[in-house]
Image (cartoon, grey):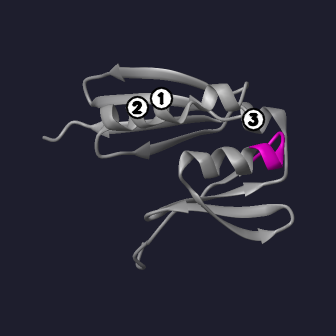
């Protein structure tokens, strides 16, 4: 690649667009409304497009990995948000450790699996 890439922004769908918009705002992303059916959600230098579109096979096979500085602190942040009380379809899975680092997991209201991970410094 001759040009320097500056970001990557996946497109994801939503089973219930309004619920997903609320969820991602609660998770700490800032929303930029692009149209009636699509928003950009961003935080720091990362972002993704949320679409008012639902294809079950697509959603069920969507996973996103976000590297965080401290997964233990991030896990505590997720617990404090009490997302599972506000969003019945949201699932949190605690931190798992691997030889490369550790991660925790969040299933969003549509079922998309988010990995929040921290790599071991070598």
Mark-to-mark CA distance, 1 and 2: 6 Å
Judged left or right of residue 102, residue 94 is right
Mark-to-mark CA distance, 3 and 1: 19 Å
Residue located at (56% from left, 45% from top):
27
Q: Residues within 10 Å of mark 2 (few under 14, many from 20)?
A: many
Q: Residues within 10 Å of mark 1 (few under 14, many from 20)?
A: few
Residue 79 circle label? 1
Residue located at (40% from left, 78% from top):
2
The answer to whether marks 1 and 2 mark residues whose Cβ atoms lie closer than 8 Å is yes
Mark-to-mark CA distance, 2 and 3: 20 Å
Which residue is label 2 attached to?
75
Give the quarter of the image for residue 30: bottom right
Q: In the structure shown, which secondary structural element does the residue marked by tag 1 occupy?
A: helix
Q: Residues within 10 Å of mark 3 (few under 14, many from 20)?
A: many
Residue located at (36% from left, 45% from top):
68
Front position among marks 2 and 3 = 2
Residue located at (86% from left, 65% from top):
36
């Amino acid at each position: 690649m001759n040009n320097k890439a500056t970001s990557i922004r996946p497109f994801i769908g939503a089973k219930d667009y309004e619920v997903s918009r609320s969820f991602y705002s609660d998770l700490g992303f800032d929303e930029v409304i692009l149209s009636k059916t699509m928003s950009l959600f961003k935080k720091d230098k990362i972002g993704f497009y949320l679409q008012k579109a639902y294809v079950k096979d697509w959603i069920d096979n969507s996973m996103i990995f976000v590297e965080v500085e401290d997964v233990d602190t991030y896990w505590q942040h997720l617990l404090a948000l009490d997302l599972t009380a506000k969003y019945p379809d949201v699932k949190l899975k605690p931190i798992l450790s691997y030889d490369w680092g550790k991660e925790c997991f969040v299933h969003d209201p549509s079922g998309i699996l988010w990995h929040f991970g921290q790599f071991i410094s070598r």
